[in-house]
Image: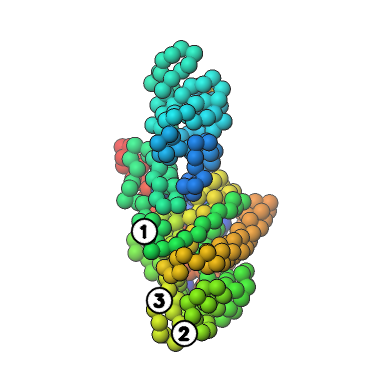
């Protein structure tokens, strides 16, 4: 077995990997961001007629709604003197630069230069395709002329009636791949998060990992899981439940978790919860961590909303803190010889990082083919 490989055998010999080097078959911090995808730019409720500045994949972007309520995303850099457009203001369907008052439409074209009264075609800012989907505003970071709508993931549990959801956001000072890997690894639950999230024996459960194309899926069953108190009372669960957790990463921007709970007796109906994590790379060392949970039952229960929000705030903040500690150390102690050791329970994460590396290579090859 060569470098950067992990045996599928349980308890198998430990392999290692470089954390930032080129030539690995796993994505790492040397891998360019995957641009040809939709990322969460913001929660829909964050964007109004006051310009919102946000860095996404190392690009400065300004988000706003025009007078009709339609979301716009433009490069946050005036083509006249590089003044950030986010320091200007929105007037009707235009954003007005705060330096010399040049006006731009949602398509990024200049609408007016006040000092001359004209609108030269050369004065243009990049406009990013955006899609509003329930609580999410997605931004396409690839070629603006060719957004791949087939790469948007339909999530009816956030847009259709019959579901309730809560959302949260953390700015995270860590590379986004660490979050993907963390989310594929359920064995850390009882150690990093404590008994509210997982029992020690859950760490030894071996997920079933499958790979279809570049989509990695991990499924694990846990028995006798403690339910959140308000939820358990409302559901009438007499005690712990059995839980099937499925994780799938359809794009680099989404980690889609589905949890199905049933009474341990096997009786009663299935209770479904979607736990969606959307890591949007900000820079090489920082990530916008958007998360949301949707549930199929008790959708009008505010106590359960509060309980879900509190669980997310606690558990995901613990993940964020761990990843920030790792980032701080990795950046401070740049040691090219250091290799991380892999253990068998890393399999899902390793498969995911390989899939992301393949996606990056394929997108790069597509871009070359289109440009040829
Ligand atoms: S810098 Fe924007 S109008 Fe001059
Ligand atoms: Fe975690």
Q: Nearer the viewer, residue 365 or 206?
A: 206
Residue at coordinates 40% horizontally, 39% vertically from top-left? 70
Quick one: label 2, few (<14), some, or many (20+) residues within 10 Å? Answer: some
Q: Element type at marker 1?
A: loop
Residue at coordinates 40% horizontally, 82% vertically from top-left? 268
- Reading the chain from its start, which is encountered first: label 1 or label 3? 1
Q: Nearer the viewer, residue 192 or 197?
A: 197
Q: Which residue is mark 3?
A: 270
Which residue is farthest top? 116
Q: Which residue is mark 1?
A: 160
Quadrant in the rendering for residue 208: bottom left
- Residue 127 visible in the shown view: no
Q: Element type at marker 3?
A: loop
Q: Up-down: is 37 above or below 256?
A: above
Which-is-in-front pick, marks 1 and 3? 1
Q: Up-down: is 114 above or below 26?
A: above
Residue 284's x, y, as percent? 56, 47
Q: Up-down: is 100 above or below 211?
A: above
Q: Element type at marker 2?
A: loop
Which-is-in-front pick, marks 1 and 2? 1
Q: How is the image coloured?
A: rainbow
Q: Which residue is mark 2?
A: 264
Q: Up-down: is 231 above or below 63?
A: below
Residue 354's x, y, as percent? 44, 60
- Reading the chain from its start, which is encountered first: label 1 or label 2? 1
Q: Nearer the viewer, residue 287 or 3?
A: 287
Residue at coordinates 54% horizontally, 41% vertically from top-left? 54
Distance from disc 1 to disc 2, alpha carbons, whole Å, reads 29 Å
Q: Are marks 2 and 3 in contact (CB under 8 Å)?
A: no
Which residue is farthest bottom? 265
């Amino acid at each position: 077995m060569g470098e950067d490989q992990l045996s599928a055998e349980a308890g198998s010999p430990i392999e290692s990997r470089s954390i930032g080097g080129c030539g690995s078959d796993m994505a790492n911090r040397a891998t360019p961001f995957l641009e040809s995808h939709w990322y969460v730019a913001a929660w829909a409720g964050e964007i109004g007629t006051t310009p919102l500045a946000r860095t996404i994949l190392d690009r400065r972007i300004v988000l706003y709604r025009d007078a009709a309520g339609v979301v716009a995303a433009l490069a946050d850099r005036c083509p006249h003197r590089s003044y950030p457009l986010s320091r200007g203001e929105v007037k009707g369907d235009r954003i007005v630069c705060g330096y010399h008052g040049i006006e731009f439409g949602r398509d990024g074209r200049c609408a007016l230069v006040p000092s001359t009264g004209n609108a030269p075609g050369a004065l243009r800012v990049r406009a990013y395709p955006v899609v509003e989907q329930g609580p999410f505003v997605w931004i396409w970071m690839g070629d603006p002329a060719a957004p791949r709508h087939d790469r948007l993931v339909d999530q009816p549990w956030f847009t259709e009636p019959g579901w309730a959801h809560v959302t949260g956001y953390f700015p995270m000072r860590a590379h986004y791949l660490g979050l993907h890997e963390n989310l594929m690894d359920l064995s850390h639950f009882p150690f990093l998060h404590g008994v509210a999230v997982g029992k020690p024996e859950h760490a030894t459960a071996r997920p079933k990992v499958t790979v279809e194309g570049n989509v990695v899926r991990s499924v694990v069953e846990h028995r006798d899981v403690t339910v959140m108190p308000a939820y358990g009372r409302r559901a009438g669960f007499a005690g712990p439940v059995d839980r099937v957790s499925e994780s799938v990463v359809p794009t680099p921007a989404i980690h889609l978790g589905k949890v199905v709970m049933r009474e341990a007796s096997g009786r009663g109906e299935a209770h479904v919860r979607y736990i969606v994590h959307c890591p949007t790379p900000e820079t090489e060392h920082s990530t916008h961590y958007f998360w949301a949970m949707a549930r199929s039952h008790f959708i009008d229960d505010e106590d359960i909303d509060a309980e879900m929000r509190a669980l997310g705030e606690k558990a995901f903040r613990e993940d964020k803190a761990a990843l920030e500690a790792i980032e701080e150390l990795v950046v401070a102690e740049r040691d090219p010889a250091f290799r991380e050791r892999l253990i068998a329970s890393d399999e899902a994460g390793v498969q995911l990082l390989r899939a992301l590396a393949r996606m990056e290579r394929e997108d790069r090859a597509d871009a070359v083919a289109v440009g040829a």
